[in-house]
Structures are given as C-alpha cells and as structure tokens.
Image (tube, grey):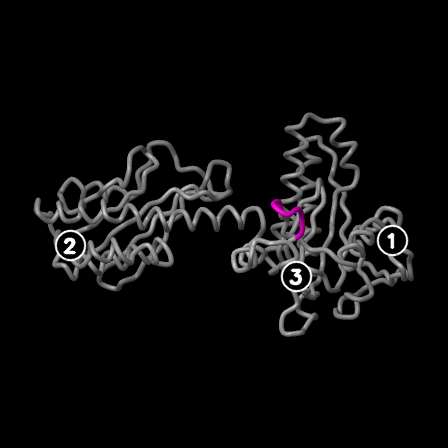
Amino acid sequence: MHLSPTLAWLLDAAAKTASADRLLAELGAHLIADGLPLVGGTLTLDVPHPLIARRTWLWRAESAEVIEALGFAPGAFAPAPLAGATTDAGQRWLTGLAAGRIHEDLIGAGPDAPSLAWIGPRAFTSAEAAELQQAARFAAAPLAAIGARATLMAALEAYLGRRSTARVLNAPLRRNVGETIQAALLFADLRGFTVLSDNNPPALVIAALDAWFDRIAGSVHVFGGEVLKFIGDGILAIFPVTDSAPRAACDAALRAVAAVRTGMAHLDGERRAQGLPPLPFGVALHLGEMFWGNIGAANRLDFTAIGPAVNLVSRLEGLCRPLGRTVLISGALAEQIDANLISLGMHELRGIASPCAVFTLPED
C-alpha cells in the first residue's frame, strides 16, 4: 500500500510530537506540501483538568501561528456562555461550513470525541475532502498517545504540583529517591476547624475549606511556590531556593502571606454579610533544608518533604494561637528579609531540641 508523505508521518513519527498544538501545525504543513489548499485548521480536545474542560487550537497556514482557546469546566472561574448566544467567529465558522470551505471530522464517536477541521480558500473538492478524512483517521493514534501523556501530566500536576510532577516523571518509582533541597517553607491551618465541622453540614464545611484553600494555594502559586500537601484544614508549601540565594525565596513566601491575609480579610467580609462566622487562621514561615522525594511502602509511594525544617515550621505554626498572632516567622527566615518584623523572643517548640527565635508581622 502506497502512503502519502503525510500519512507516513502520521503513522511513523507524529506520536512523538510534543503536544497537540504542534501536531496540528505540523499536520497542516504536511497537508499543504501534499498539495491540499488550506488557510487554517482547528483541533479540539477534551482534557482532564480541574478548571479546563476543552482546549481548542487554531492554526493559520500563512504565519504558521497557533493560538489557543479554552473552554472552562462548570464551576470554574470563567462565566458560562449565555444560552443560545452565537459569537461572530462562530457565525463565520457556520457560514464557511455551509459553503464547503470547512471540512470537519470527529476522531471517534460521541459528543466528546476530538474534532479536527480544516479551512480552505474555496470549497473543497470531493477528492480533497477524502484526503482530509483519511488524514483524520491516521491522526487518531498519535492524538491518542498525545492525549494520554497530557492526561498523565494533568492528573499528576493536579495532585502533586508542577515541580513535584517533573521530579516524579524524571526519576525511578522507588523509595528513597529524591534530593535534599533548601527552601522557604510555609505551614498554615484554620483555627476552630473542629468546631466548624461538628456544628455545620458537610456541604458548608467543604465550601469553607475550598474557599480557604483557594486563597492560600492561589497566593502560593502566584509567587512561585508549590503546595506539597493539604493536611485536613492545613497546608504545607515550599518556595525552593535557586542559585544558592535564599533571599528571593523568603521574599516570595512573605509576599504570599501578605496576599493570603488580604484574601482572607475579603472572604471574612463576605461570610459576615451572609451571617457566617469568619475563618481565623495561623501561618508560619521558616527557611531550612528538607528531603524532597519518595517515601512510603514498597508498592505505595508518596512524594513529599520530610526533615527537621518541616517539623519546625509545623510546630511554629502551633504557637500562633497561644501567642495570639496570625503570622509567625522563624529567625532563620527573618535574617533573609527586610520587612518590618516584631520580635517575640525565643520559644521552645515541641519536639525541637533548640529554642527558636520567633518574629511576627504587624497585625494591621
């Protein structure tokens, strides 16, 4: 059987393409080289992501440019489109489809199947449409491979975070595989969560937890940190030190805390307006070394951080309530920042051999 260069590429090499957008661009270039008249194309895929439901890539033949449009999942931050609304772009698409200038194939069955479509400068002939349909059939396997990789990455990043996912994928799946790193550590949790849980229905408790985690995890990510663990109502996050310069990581952690305080103050205002109690919290910052990698049973691993620095930051957060402070900062991290800090003296921490110098921020 003789295969065109495009079909041979789809069969032999396309599965190694780095991403779906690159496959669309390279496939379009191959089809043009085969003599098909194309001015653009689109590829739409469902994706397993907490916020994004569908991704659509738009390719222009003239510039080889690919742009992306996102379809957000129900309940995500993007507003849902109005029922029955049709955009100008959508209307132009339908007009082009009716005129035969657009050829579209569903790669598979069902409403969630990938969609591959091509735009021509004129109506496609029946022979050209057949070639495009054949290319779509051959594109099914490489798209499935690319989709499987994307699914794996999305799932791991949703549960582990981006940096940890990269570490997991680039190392053996065995215990004791990891490294010792220096990082600014952030540990925080809600105060009075047990009372909140005992006196409210699960739906309200979960909504409060989600709102809290949105504020603190969002602030961590904005300033370059990574959430390692959600622990009940608590969170452990890190800001890894790069280039042996801890000041930048410590400053980023401090800015994240400032953003959390602002976000939670706004959330508490909304809750009071709804007749709900505020959500007080405590947060601690520390700078130290930790083991970052795989621990666990032989066949059930966890990618996490352990070590004296992790123990210290969690114990330090436990002082927030008795000291009546929202934010506590260890002496190790305080030495790296220029913020206006208030010294609270030396304090013994449970399970920590040496007393810790403790600082805080002005409460206002």
If you read the primary sequence from the N terminus, does the residue marked by circle 1 or circle 3 appear first? 3
What residue lies at 45% left-to-right and 42% top-to-bottom?
48
> Which mark is in front, 3 or 2?
2
Eyeballing the image, is 344 above or below 336? above
Identify the amino acid type marked 3.
Phe
> Which mark is in front, 1 or 3?
1
Q: Is residue 27 left or right of residue 170?
A: left
Labels 3 and 2 touching (C-beta < 8 A): no
Magenta-colored span: 295-300
Identify the amino acid type marked 1.
Gly
Q: Is residue 364 visible?
A: no
What residue lies at 47% left-to-right and 48% top-to-bottom?
152
Q: CA distance from mark 3 to mark 2?
A: 52 Å
Could you say where residue 355 lies in the image, as x and y percent from the top left? 90, 61
Which label is found at residue 309?
none
What secondary structure prevails in the magenta region? strand
Quadrant, the C terminus? bottom right
Labels 1 and 2 touching (C-beta < 8 A): no
Label 2: which residue? 3
Label 3: which residue? 239
Label 1: which residue? 351
Could you say where residue 262 lies in the image, as x and y percent from the top left? 68, 51
Q: In terms of depth relative to the viewer, which is nearer, 41 or 161? A: 161
Count up the numbered dots: 3
Identify the amino acid type marked 2.
Leu
Helix, strand or loop for disc 1: loop
What residue lies at 68% left-to-right and 51% top-to-bottom?
260
Labels 1 and 3 touching (C-beta < 8 A): no
